[in-house]
Structure formats: C-alpha cells, structure tokens
Image: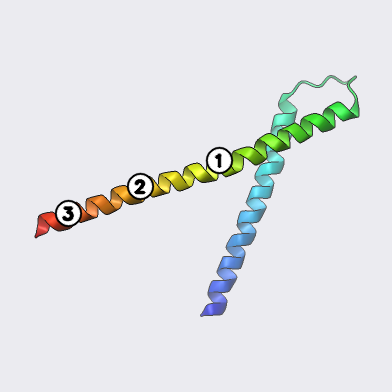
C-alpha cells in the first residue's frame, strides 16, 4: 500500500515539475517573441530579451500558485461555514 502511494506522489511530483518547466520555456519564448527584435540586432540583444522573458515568467508562476492557494482557502472557509450553519439549523 505504501509503495503505491509513493509511486503516485512521485508521479505527481514529476508531472508538476515538467509542467512548470514547460510553462517557463513556453512563456519565455512567448514573451521574447513579442519583443520586436530587428534582424540587424546583435546576439546579446536577443539573449537579453530571452533572459528578461524568463525572469518575468519565473515571477508569474509562484504568483499564480499563491492566487490558487488563496482561492482554495477562501472556498474551504465558505464550505466550512455553510456546513456548520446547516448542522446548527438541523438541531
């Protein structure tokens, strides 16, 4: 039984890690693709924009995770309050 739960948690961790890596790479390419870099610009300008895109994406991911945790906390409080009021009204 423990081995199955360890496998599931390991699989969930791998999926989570790969999805975050995919989001970072995809977002970085998207943000650096938005910037209009002319063909005559140097390689350093392109590398800088790629780095800037990576920084922005890496800052957005924890923000979204925090926002999701906040929503989860708010809805769990609302659920507990509604269950407690239903329990009191039945008595």
What residue is shown at x 74% (from left), y 30% (from top)?
Answer: 32
Q: Position of residue 65 (x, y in %)?
A: 53, 46
Instruction: Give how far across and how far down residue 38 sits, in percent.
Output: 84, 19
Left or right: residue 48 compared with residue 26: right
Q: Which mark is residue 63?
A: 1
**C-alpha span from label 1 to label 2:** 18 Å
Q: Earlier in the sequence, mark 1 or mark 3?
A: 1
Chain-order first, disc 1 or disc 2: 1
Q: Which residue is mark 2?
A: 75
Query: Do the CB atoms of the residues marked 3 and 2 lie less than 8 Å apart?
Result: no
- Camera-nearest residue between 1 and 61: 61
Relative to residue 6, is residue 80 depicted above or below?
above
**Residue depicted at x 63% and y 39%:** 59
Tell me, yes or no, whether the two marked residues, 1 and 3, touch with CB atoms within 8 Å: no
Q: Quadrant of residue 89?
A: bottom left
Name the disc covering residue 6, or none.
none
């Amino acid at each position: 039984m423990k081995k199955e739960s360890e496998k599931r948690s390991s699989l969930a961790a791998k999926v989570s890690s790969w999805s975050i890596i995919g989001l970072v790479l995809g977002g970085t390419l998207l943000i650096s693709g938005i910037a209009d870099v002319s063909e005559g610009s140097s390689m350093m300008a392109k590398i800088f924009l790629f780095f800037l895109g990576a920084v922005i994406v890496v800052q957005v991911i924890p923000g979204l995770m925090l926002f999701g945790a906040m929503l989860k906390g708010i809805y769990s409080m609302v659920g507990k309050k509604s269950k407690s009021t239903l329990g009191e009204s039945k008595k």
